[in-house]
Every structure is written in C-alpha cells, then in structure tokens.
C-alpha cells in the first residue's frame, strides 16, 4: 500500500514538474499569459470602465478654443509654402490624371497570417511582404519593432524603419489618403497597408492595421487581408468591407497608409500617388479635409476624429499652438460620445497631443493626459506616455519623477531612443 502511495506521489510530482517545464516554454507561456492578462483586463475594465476616464484640457473655453483654432488655421492656410518634390533619383513628375479602373480587382499571393498577442502591425506587414515573395513572418519583425512583446502598439513609422533597416524594399508613408488612390495602387498590383479604427463587443474601440488587396465597385466593397479575423472557410480568400465603413474607420487615423514596393516600382508608385507623393502636399490635403470635416460631420465621434486629425496634421506642420487648440476641441467632444463607442485607447496609437501641449508649455496637460491614458490600463505598457510625462515633469522641476518615468519608458521598450537621449541630456546613465 505504501509503495503504491509513494509511486502515486512521485507520479504527481513528475507531472507537476513536467507541467511546469512545459508551461514556461516560450510559446506555451505566451498563450497562458495572454489569456491570464485578458481575464485580468476584463475584470478590471468592468470594475473601473476606462471609457469613463476622460481627459479635460486645462486651458481655454469651448468658444475661445474654437475661435482660436479658426484664426490659427486661416493664417496657417494662407502661409503654406509651395511644396517641393524630393526623390531619390531622376523620376518623372507625378501626375494626378485619373486612371480608368476595372470594376473589380483582387490581388492573389498574400500569405494570410494570424496575429500573435498585440502583433497586428508585424503580422500585417509580414502579410504585405509575403506578396513580394519575402520569406519571413511576424516573428522576424516583432522582436525588432517591439522588443517588449507586451507592447500594445507599433507605430507606422516603426514599421517603415524596419523596412528601411532590414529589407531591400522601398516604402512611402502618408496621411491624407483617399479611396481612389488605394484602388489605383491595387489595380497596379500593389497592396496597401492602412491603420484604422476597429471595434468588438468585448474590447470596444481600438486601432488596427489592415492590408487592402482589392475592391469591388459592383458591391461597393474593399477586399482586405486581416491578421485578427479568422477566414471561415477555404473558399474565403479575403474579408470585404463596405466603402462607407472603410472610410469611417480609416478617418480615425487621419487616412494614413503605407505602401511597400520593390525599387523597380518607384516611378509607378510616384505617379499613382500624384500629389500625395510630396509629403508637405499630403499634409495640406489631410489638413484641409480634417478642417472641413470639423463642421460638415454631425456625429460626435466622427467630429472628435476630425478635430484630432486636424491637431495631428498641425503638429506635423509644426503649428503647435493651432494643434493644441484642435486637440482641446476634440477632447471637449468626448463626453458627448456614447460610452461604448468612446475611443478611449486613442493615445495608445497616436502621440500628437503630447507634442502640441509640451511645445506650448502646457506641461500639466501633458502629465494629466498621460495619467488618463496609463492609469485605466490593465497593463500600462506605453513607452511614449511615460516618455512625454517624464519630459513634462522635468520641465516642472520634478527630476526624480522625470528620471523614473524615462527609465520606465525604457523598461517598456528596451533601448527606446528618445528616452535614452533625454536621460543623457539630464546627465543620467540610461
């Protein structure tokens, strides 16, 4: 009897030890920790709804903000310099002549790849590159663009940096895109990555990358490859999105798009983009559209994104005062958005307000916005928010908090360049 009991105990110990070893294998632990984090986040968000944590700008009133924005924008618009085209070599001038397009186009050859945890950017870029016969996958990209696997987001510029530093492909990243340009690129055999808003019943609003691989004018739909949505059957080769839904969701990210292509396609891409090839012109296109939509749209969330886009574009045009006013107007609209629809994760993906408030010396607003972003999160892993909060704390003379936040930024994103530079300038070893 004792021998049987001892054998049972030893057997159980062996199972526990082997189970522990298997559990801590990276692929297994990644899945376990993912589900554990999902459960924790679900509980926390039910107890403390993050959509209720609203950032309130600390300066200005609605009327003053609106008047200031319009005056600033009017001055900015008349002062915009003539854009110049900079290309890596002799290329033909871009043309905006409309290209007659077939009613339906679908690009084959993309290897569908389901994203791992918070891996939407790397997975979608991997799918994009697979069209050009690239042999890697998201695991080739993710460790470089997000050294911390728990990082919530990869910025478009980080994906472009990966392409420049790790592949032979060319790329162009622009705001202010339009559906006709997407169709022209796809018709020419060039898929396009976009970043857009995306909602689920469980998660609410979030940002998401998608690869446009076709369109169907007979159904008013774009055809896409998606790293989050599972294709339901072998006969399903793409996900379709109506033009209206596509445009509305794309608005959430200022109509940003990333075109990846081999060097020999350079002239084709330039001519297909037309005026969007030139970055200052693209900024102005995005600016004018956003400004128009601040008054033409009626839905509170759509108007929030219009004002936010206006602020983001003005940041890129170095008009920080106008940008700060535009972001103020956006955040004043947040309480008017139904709670379930609020884009409370917006600062996970975009950083324009930090630039605008910091460079207009509104340091308390930088700190309050970072707090409103980080505190409700189940797992606060946003290097940009820690970084900007640290800069603002330093300006207000709180060196201890500033150093702690800048180091936290580097913990979240090892080697994060801006935080390294800021600490070095403060005489602190990163």
Image (cartoon, helix red, strand yellow):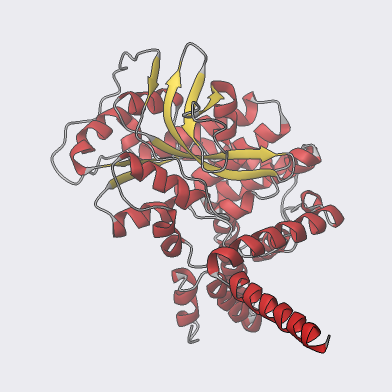
Residue lying at 69% horizontally and 77% vertically, measured from the top left: 16
Judge by depth and name the residue closer to the eye, 388 or 248.
Answer: 248
Q: Residue at x 54, y 41 (%)?
A: 253
Q: Residue furthest front?
A: 1
- Which residue occupies the foreground of this view, 112 or 337? 112
Q: Residue furthest left?
A: 90
Quadrant location, the N terminus: bottom right
Whether residue 65 sits left or right of residue 408 in the image: it is right
Give x and y (percent) for residue 344.
70, 48
User: Which residue, as the protein is rendered here, is positioned at the far right?
Assistant: 47
Figure check: 2 above or below 196: below
| Vertical position of residue 429 compared to residue 91: above or below | below
Q: Quadrant of residue 200?
A: top right
Q: Is residue 375 above or below residue 395?
A: above
- Residue 263 appears left or right of 408: left
Residue 207: horizontal and vertical position, in percent?
A: 59, 45
Q: In front: 328, or 256? A: 256
Left/right of residue 33 with respect to residue 265 in the rendered view: right
For residue 429, side relative to residue 62 (left or right): left
State how many labels appear: 0
């Amino acid at each position: 009897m004792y021998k049987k009991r001892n054998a049972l105990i030893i057997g159980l110990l062996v199972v526990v030890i082997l189970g522990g070893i298997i559990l801590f294998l990276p692929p297994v632990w990644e899945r376990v920790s993912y589900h554990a984090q999902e459960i924790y986040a679900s509980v926390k968000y039910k107890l403390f709804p993050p959509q209720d944590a609203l950032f309130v700008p600390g300066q200005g009133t609605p009327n003053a903000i609106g008047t200031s924005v319009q005056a600033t924008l009017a001055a900015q618009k008349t002062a915009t310099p003539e854009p110049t085209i900079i290309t890596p070599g002799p290329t033909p001038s871009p043309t905006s002549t409309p290209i007659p397009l077939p009613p339906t186009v679908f690009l084959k050859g993309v290897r569908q790849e389901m994203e791992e945890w918070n891996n939407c950017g790397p997975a979608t870029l991997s799918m994009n590159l697979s069209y050009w016969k690239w042999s890697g996958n998201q695991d080739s990209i993710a460790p470089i663009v997000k050294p911390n696997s728990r990082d919530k987001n990869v910025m478009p510029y980080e994906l472009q940096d990966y392409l420049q530093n790790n592949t032979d492909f060319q790329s162009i990243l622009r705001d202010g895109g339009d559906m006709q340009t997407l169709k022209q690129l796809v018709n020419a055999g060039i898929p396009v990555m976009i970043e857009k808003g995306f909602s689920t019943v469980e998660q609410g609003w979030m940002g998401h990358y998608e690869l446009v691989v076709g369109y169907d004018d007979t159904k008013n739909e774009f055809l896409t490859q998606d790293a989050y949505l599972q294709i339901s059957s072998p006969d399903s080769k793409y996900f379709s999105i109506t033009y209206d839904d596509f445009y509305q969701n794309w608005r959430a990210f200022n109509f940003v798009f990333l075109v990846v292509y081999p060097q020999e396609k350079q002239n084709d891409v330039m001519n297909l983009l037309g005026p969007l090839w030139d970055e200052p012109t693209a900024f102005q296109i995005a600016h004018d559209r956003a400004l128009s939509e601040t008054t033409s749209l009626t839905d509170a969330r759509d108007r929030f994104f219009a004002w936010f886009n206006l602020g983001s574009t003005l940041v890129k045009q170095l008009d920080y005062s106008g940008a700060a006013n535009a972001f103020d107007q956006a955040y004043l609209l947040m309480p008017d958005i139904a709670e379930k629809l609020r884009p409370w994760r917006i600062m996970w993906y975009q950083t324009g307000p930090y630039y605008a408030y910091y460079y207009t010396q509104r340091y308390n607003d930088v700190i309050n916005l970072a707090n409103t972003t980080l505190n409700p999160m189940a797992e606060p892993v946003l290097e940009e928010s820690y970084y900007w909060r640290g800069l603002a704390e330093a300006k207000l003379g709180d060196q201890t908090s500033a150093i702690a936040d800048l180091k936290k930024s580097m913990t979240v994103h090892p080697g994060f360049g801006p935080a390294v530079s800021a600490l070095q300038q403060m005489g602190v070893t990163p």
